[in-house]
Image (tube, helix red, strand yellow):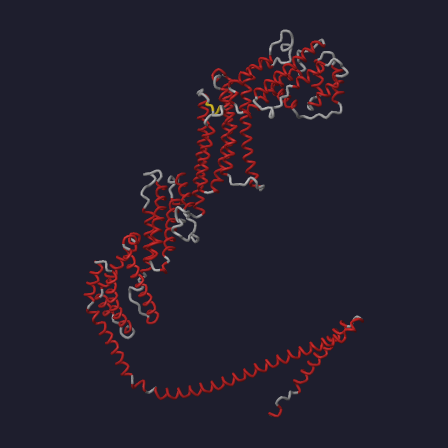
Amino acid sequence: MDVFVGVPSPSTQIPESNALDDMRREAETNALRIIQAKLEKPENLEKLDQLRTAAAQRKRTLDEQLRTAVQSQLESIKTGIEQLRISFDNIKTVKQTMHETDDKLQKIAPLQSKLEDLRIEANSYRQLSLAQANLDYIIKTPENVKKADDFMGQEKLLQAHQLIMEIENSRNYLLFELHKVQEKDSQPDDIQLITTYFADYERLVAHLRQLISFRISRWYDCAISAPEKLVTALRLIEREEQVDRFWMEKKELTGFSPPDRPRQWKKLCFELLRKSVKDRIEGNQLETREEHKYWLTRHLEMCRQIFLRDFRIITKTCLRCFPKQYDIVNRFLDYYHNCLKEHLTEICDPKRRTEGDTLTTAEVYTIVTFVRDYQGAECLGNPELKLDLTQLSPLLEKDILAAVTDVFINERKQKFTEWIPNIIASEVKDWYALKEVELTSEHYYATTMPRMLINMIIETLDMAKQMSDETCQLILGMILQKINEFRDLYVNEINNYAKRYFGDRQSFKENFTKQMVANANNCESIPNFVLIVRKKYDRDDLDDLSRSSQQQLDRYESMGKKFERTAEYCCEVILQEIEVDTVKFLKILFTREWFGPTAKQCCGTIIETTRDYWSTELTHLKKPLLAYLFYTWHKRILAHYLRNLFSRSTNIKFATPAERRVCAEQLRKESSQLDKEFKIWDGASTDNATEYHFNILCNIADVLEQTDLDSIVLEIATLAKKYPSLSMDQVTQLLLLRGDLTKQEAKDKADAALANMPRVSQGILSEIMEIVNQIN
């Protein structure tokens, strides 16, 4: 059959030939497509030689790559065949060696039964030799017990531990030997005998454990005064850990472990350290709420001082005493943090407190500020300690902290609910007691009420800000709400005060105006105080046009406007008092009693009465309010003029042009007097002078004085242009006062003057006529 090697069978040759033909045809087709694409344009024929050269170069390159690939494959195949040959030879050698070993083992097998007796004797010899080696220790056990007691009495724990380990090794050897024979012959009496014989050993171990525990519990004192004692205790713990690990491995191999292993003294050490930390934290609470008001402040301050003092010792001394693998600094940090966390949680958790045993505001403030500063430079964040605080959990969980904060907020809300009526009640008491109103350094009347209010607000916000920005914002929102309630109560008391005064003016005559001036000044100053509060405590950026910031801004603006209206209301009450004093002269303005040979000096009396108020009480009213007061007063005086002028029941009518001229001159004169006096009284500078509208009387005088009935329409049109709210009825009534026109003629001229002239219900005349309607 070897002659046919290399000759493919017909069944495989035909498919392979077909595949090659297909590949050849596909290659020719692709070549024709490429040539067609390259020679598509006539000018490409000139590049035919270049294309042939490039194709030949590519062919040579591909042939070289194919030759290299085939050569590489052949080399790999040759290497693989050689490795297979070597493996085959190795298999033959291993097989032959296994046969030889099996033959030798067959010859050795009969020796097992012949040497059985020798094996038993060897085991007996080994056991007896071990027993002889430990015989001294067994015999010396009572002596070693006594020596160990003496060493522990002298606090020589290392020597005591060495003796205890010798005793333990003797006991464990005997127990282990008994363990090995238990499967064949259980001997409980022997185990009991050993246990009884080594009973003192257990006492020694318990005593040693007690001494080590004492040193670990007193780690702080040991680290300061006797660090070697602490190191000794830790060395013994590490030795015990090694013995524990030995017997755990032994148990996996033999199934035997001494009855008191593992002792886990390292775990005990950590438990004692944590307990000592907990005792140090809870043990410095020397007082209760009943014994001292600031018990919690003193307690947490003691904790802070203990933390600083202890961690100075931990980072300097304990770090050198404890084994490195204990990571003692971070371990102590975890113990102190978690023990303090549990302690504070127990103090703060409302579920653990009785109904009447709630935290006070001072206690809440103390807790929250302590939590805030806990990781600061005054405590764990002290640069000297160099502690890694990144892994610490929050000292108080969010729900506990929120509950504590709610106690503070609710208590402050309750306090404000109590304080605000008390402040107002104290203020009102001074009103009715006719207490002299004090002057400020700027010579304005004011009371202590705004200062009391703002001090109370700032004190509360300072506490809240010390706690957290979130608490400050919540308190600020509550305070703004309470200030609005304060304003409502304040306005109500001002109303009651004014009603009582106007019901019996003699009772408060000497004090009422001064107090109203002080009230107006108080209300004017409160928005300024609130502005200070906003700048200092409101964290929203007013330059930010966000919805929240805009809402905050609107809230403050709304409050400021409310107090401005209250201040203006106080000014209006003062004006009401002035008006009561001048009412009989105001009522007869522009009547027969005001005009004529027997006329009363109404305008002069009004001016003198107003000047009297200005020179006594109103000079102590703040300038913005003084300007508002006189501007409102000038509108009320004009309202009394126009009330009679536009009234259909007026009793003044002019029979001759001379009377109209005299009336017009009187209006101009009084207008000039009033304008001059008011500009003196309001104290405004020339650049900031208030525009008073007494010239409306001069404009009316021009209409009354006009002698040319044809030109009077022009005068009316001029008047209507200055005062767009002037109505047809008002113009008609003004023309009828002249006495030289019939009702129809007055209407016609009014209609002619106002024709095609837009009318609007606004302007100074509209404002004055609203006052007229109120008077009527």
Give the mark count: 0
Front-lying residue, 239 or 261: 239
* Quarter of the rendering containing residue 65: bottom right
Q: Where residue 625 appears, x then y in whole percent?
A: 55, 25
Front-lying residue, 463 or 12: 463
* Quarter of the rendering containing residue 294: top left
Q: Where residue 584 appears, x then y in whole percent?
A: 58, 13
Q: Is residue 494 left or right of residue 216?
A: right
Residue at image coords 30%, 54%: 223
Residue at image coords 72%, 26%: 758
Q: Where residue 764 appears, x then y in whole percent?
A: 65, 23
Quadrant (top left, top right, bottom left, bottom right) of the N terminus: bottom right
Check the image and name the residue furthest to the right: 42
Check the image and name the residue furthest to the top: 597
Does any portion of residue 44 appear in the rendered image?
A: yes
Q: Is residue 47 left or right of residue 357?
A: right
